Amino acid sequence: MNIDWITLRENATLSNKLLNEFRYQWGRDNEFQFSQPPLAGEPTNSVGGRSPQTFITNGFSFGIPEFLERPAFPDERRNQFADTMTLTQGSHTLKWGGDINFVKDIISNLRFSGGEFNYTGGVNAVGFYGGLNDFIIDYTNFISPGSLPANTPCYSSTRTVGRCYGGNFNQGLGVLGLTMKTTDLNFFVQDDWRVNPRLTLNLGMRYEYQKNPTNVASRINSVLPQTANRVSDKNNWGPRLGFAYDITGDGKTSLRGGWGLYYGRVINSTVYNALINTGVGVDVAQRQVTITASNAAAPSYPNLLTSGTLVAPAVQYFASGFQLPQIHQADLVFERQIARNTAVSASYLFSFANSLPNFVDTNLPQPTGTVNFTVAGGPFDGQIFRSPIFVGSRPNTAFGAVTEIRSNVFSKYHAFVLQANRRLTNGLQFQVNYTLSRAEDNGQSSTTFTANNLPFNAFDQSQETALSAFDRRQKFVASVVYNTNFASLKDNKAGRAIFNGWTSAPILNAFSGQRFTGNVSGTISPTAFGFASNTTPGGGVNGSGGATRFALVPRNFFKQPKIWYFDARLSRRFKITEGTNIEVLAEGFNLFNRTQVTTVNQTLYSISGSTLTFNSGASGFNSVTGADSTLFRERQVQLGLRFQF
């Protein structure tokens, strides 16, 4: 990674009432990354002698990651100009200005260029564990071709030796990338109006426009004219309103509030995918291929497809009338000063976002019908899991997933916050806050790449509304800084030397665990439900290649354990001269050494014919798979010595 930038700023006083600030930035963000050479014994293929990405459910993964190789992703050049005028006129302070950002992205990155094999599945009728068993069969076939009988039992009887993988095979074919340019235009005007000594109003308006590139004719698919669509949303007006009111007139009790309409960008990686994944020839575009092992063209592990292989490519395009993300944000804060430099407050926070991006496969047949899985074991033992099923080929067999990038997802957030704050006074400072919140959405995704199909059922997304993965219902944070300076020791030299001059700073964080969705591993076998064919357009629990959640319960129904940790700092300064001192300090993090669960196994059930088998055992559903983050780990203690001058 190489990052360089130049920033220029000029401030000018044009009169005693008018100011101007001009800013310019040139920047370059050149990011690149290459995979590591394989270890001895790793299966390799023709792409640089690397191992394909190999994922084994509830096991391990290895090989070249799907996002590599990455010669330039991106090599981004930026020229940005901004200018702001400020005019003070009586009780008004007016600001207006604009920002123009020219960005050029040179992209050289073919996702899945090294291939990706997914080994999924539960325990089959013969008693073999799907993912690991199937990988061992295919790996043995690679090491010693022909050593295994062709009828060696894979998890699914529809697969053969060398092609035992239960999940999809993914591969990218075609050119490495392209060069694209975007321009962001932003303009605003704002008036801060002091109506009277007790009331201030803030009024504003902002306009934003994201100009995206138009696809070149050679990459537009004549069979799918919608691949010519681009984002051209020009109605992004964002009004802002705020106020601050001194209720009692003594500066001790206030009511503040505000509302604003904000807009987000479509990230350039999404624009890039719609430009290059149009399903045309690999000499001008990229082809993302996703097939199952039962497909006659599917490769044997760890081999890859050649560019001339006639496999239906995936396509991504923007929906007609695509809108930029739109976010309404509002807050209302009541604050009261209860002592010197000490205040308490109660706040209500609200956020509503709509037109968030969604990725929906439009090349699916209507659901063929519904099927009933019998649930065996676990918290839903004996219940019936009723699911739509997608059987047969895609309506347009010339293509795989044809993903429409839509702007039809919403999210809501409500929060009530209590706070107590004290600025450093008489040696004591503290901040304490408690938040009670609720977040929900209808399928929001934080993916940075264009997914093939996000909904459980692309034809009925009404069941997607549920609590958000960001829903942490409660959060409590308390921090204190206390400096010892006991006045009673002013005449006691020894007492001052021992007890004064210390600073202690404990911090307590506690919040609800993160929510997650229980998933079903494996691919449905339609013949287990009486269908004549085992062909599905996308695989997964219902054959659509979309979400694989256990749909008897909503998304994000389950919750990880709560997280709490206690940090502390103790220090003492020793004066050397008038301008120098030495500080001795000790800091401890997660002092109670509590295990903080950050990720768990989310596979709730696995498919075995017409039965969903509970993922039990020590490494089964809800077992801990991660217990650290950048914020908290195992207990750590550090000592320090600081010289200040």
Image: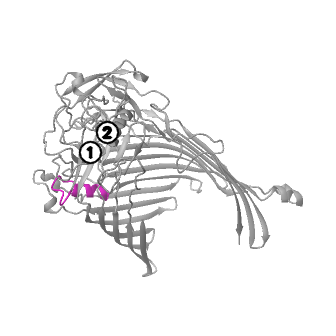
Reply above or below: 539 against 111: above
Magenta stretch: includes residue 137: no
What is the total number of numbered labels drawn onto the structure image? 2
Q: Are marks 1 and 2 in contact (CB under 8 Å)?
A: no
Label 2 residue SS: helix
Q: Give the extent of the magenta segment.
A: 267-285
Mark 2: few/some/many CA within 10 Å (<14, 14-19, 20+): many
Toward the viewer: 166 or 567?
A: 166
Q: Is residue 624 visible?
A: yes
Mark 1: few/some/many CA within 10 Å (<14, 14-19, 20+): many
Q: Position of residue 157 (x, y in %)?
A: 26, 28
Q: Is residue 87 visible?
A: no
Image check: 384 left or right of 577? left
Q: Quadrant of residue 544?
A: top left
Scheme of image coloration: one colour
Residue type at mark 2 is Asn
Q: Position of residue 12 (x, y in %)?
A: 44, 80
What residue is at 42 percent from the left and 73 percent from the top?
Answer: 5
Look at mark 2 in the image and give the residue it sits on: 141
What residue is at 24 percent from the left and 62 percent from the top?
Answer: 212
Sequence-first disc among 1 and 2:
2
Label 1 to label 2: alpha-carbon separation: 31 Å
Farthest-out residue, top: 382
Image check: 587 left or right of 628? right
Look at mark 1 in the image and give the residue it sits on: 452
Label 1 residue SS: loop
Q: Position of residue 59 (x, y in %)?
A: 42, 38
Residue type at mark 1 is Asn
Image check: 108 left or right of 253? left
Image check: 39 left or right of 162? right
